[in-house]
Image (spheres, grey):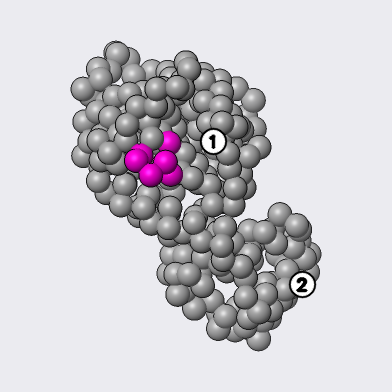
């Protein structure tokens, strides 16, 4: 099953049309749309962490989850260059409008707790972190957040590792509910920069514009992810993959969670015909795979993912 969660109907409308979804009549207070095959559900959650979390919990409990389930949060975000220099911000800010990002780090703006979805698949989006806030950020508040980071770091660059400051209102809520039903690799967070911090109310037409232009491209990628997620249920790691998996786990001192992430990565590489065995055995021969502890092992695994998925 594919579950898509979006805050507003204006954002969801182009996807409802593109995917030919129909309104679900017996969904109570929840606004749900479903495809003809019954394999995809789109929920319009309303804005906010709590609303998003409640919708995710309802859909996952009602329709069920398994190894092939994929949860996708699509929405708009405020964005700004993560630099305190006013000139850089003014030049780069306008260039961000309309750009799409996939979240590789989610920060709860209230608690500052950070979550890390596992991106174990190829995608056409830039990766950035997303901070989920409880109220809409104004442009002056976005600037103040960046200045505070810079002052902590003692220079122009923000203390944050993020190149772009993205703020939304739902991602963390979706994650916190979804992780109770599926693995961290079974979810993704796509955000388009619609503004630089809203100081006036955006209209439905304003929002729909950003999503209508990209709906076809994103739906094509969604189909690729659906094909991949279906294989998670039926495909098992073969003998060769099992040998490489055990080698990786032994050399990196992998935890149970890390082993599952490695298994998903090898499964994806096998399905996508990405030659990983030669690379891993080469690393072992060059002793770059010989990690002294789990911390080094985790760092190696992150580098391995980068090389396999993006090179």
Magenta stretch secondary structure, dominant: loop
Residue 175 visible in the shown view: no
The answer to whether residue 224 is seen in the rendering is yes
Instruction: Work out whether residue 16 or residue 189 is closer to the camera in this orientation and state it.
Output: 16
Nearer-the-camera pick, 33 or 81 = 33
Residue under label 2: 250
Question: What residue is drawn where x is 43% and y is 53%?
Answer: 226
**In the rendered structure, are the residues bearing label 2 and label 1 in contact, judged by CB atoms less than 8 Å apart?**
no
Task: Determine whether 202 is above or below 62 in the image.
Answer: above
User: What x and y, as percent, mark residue 242?
Assistant: 67, 75
Q: Which residues are magenta?
A: 35-41
Q: Quadrant of the C terminus?
A: bottom left
What residue sits right under mark 1 in the picture?
63
Q: Tell me the element at label 2.
A: helix
Which residue corresponds to the image point at 67% horizontal and 59% vertical from the top-left? 260
Residue 305 falls inside the magenta stretch: no
């Amino acid at each position: 099953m594919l579950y898509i969660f979006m805050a507003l109907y204006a954002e969801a409308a182009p996807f409802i049309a593109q995917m030919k979804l129909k309104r679900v009549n017996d969904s109570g207070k929840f606004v749900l749309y479903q495809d003809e095959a019954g394999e995809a559900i789109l929920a319009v959650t309303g804005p906010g962490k709590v609303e998003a979390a409640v919708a995710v919990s309802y859909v996952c409990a009602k329709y069920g989850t398994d190894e092939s389930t994929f949860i996708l949060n699509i929405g708009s975000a405020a964005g700004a260059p993560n630099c305190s220099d006013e000139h850089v911000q003014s030049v780069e800010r306008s260039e961000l409008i309309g750009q799409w990002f996939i979240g590789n780090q989610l920060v709860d703006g209230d608690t500052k707790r950070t979550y890390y979805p596992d991106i174990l698949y190829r995608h056409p989006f830039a990766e950035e972190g997303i901070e989920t806030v409880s109220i809409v950020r104004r442009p002056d508040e976005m600037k103040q957040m960046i200045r505070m980071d810079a002052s902590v770091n003692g220079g122009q660059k923000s203390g944050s590792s993020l190149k772009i400051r993205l703020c939304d209102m739902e991602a963390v809520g979706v994650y916190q509910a979804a992780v109770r039903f599926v693995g961290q690799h079974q979810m993704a967070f796509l955000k388009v920069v619609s503004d630089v911090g809203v100081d006036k109310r955006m209209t439905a037409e304003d929002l729909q514009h950003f999503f209508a232009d990209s709906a076809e491209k994103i739906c094509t990628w969604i189909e690729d992810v659906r094909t991949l997620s279906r294989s998670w249920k039926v495909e098992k790691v073969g003998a060769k993959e099992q040998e490489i998996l055990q080698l990786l786990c032994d050399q990196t001192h992998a935890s149970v969670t890390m082993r599952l992430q490695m298994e998903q990565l090898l499964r994806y590489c096998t399905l996508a015909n990405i030659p990983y065995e030669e690379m891993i055995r080469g690393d072992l021969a060059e002793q770059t795979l010989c990690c002294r502890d789990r911390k080094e092992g985790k760092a190696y695994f992150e580098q391995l993912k980068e090389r396999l998925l993006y090179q």
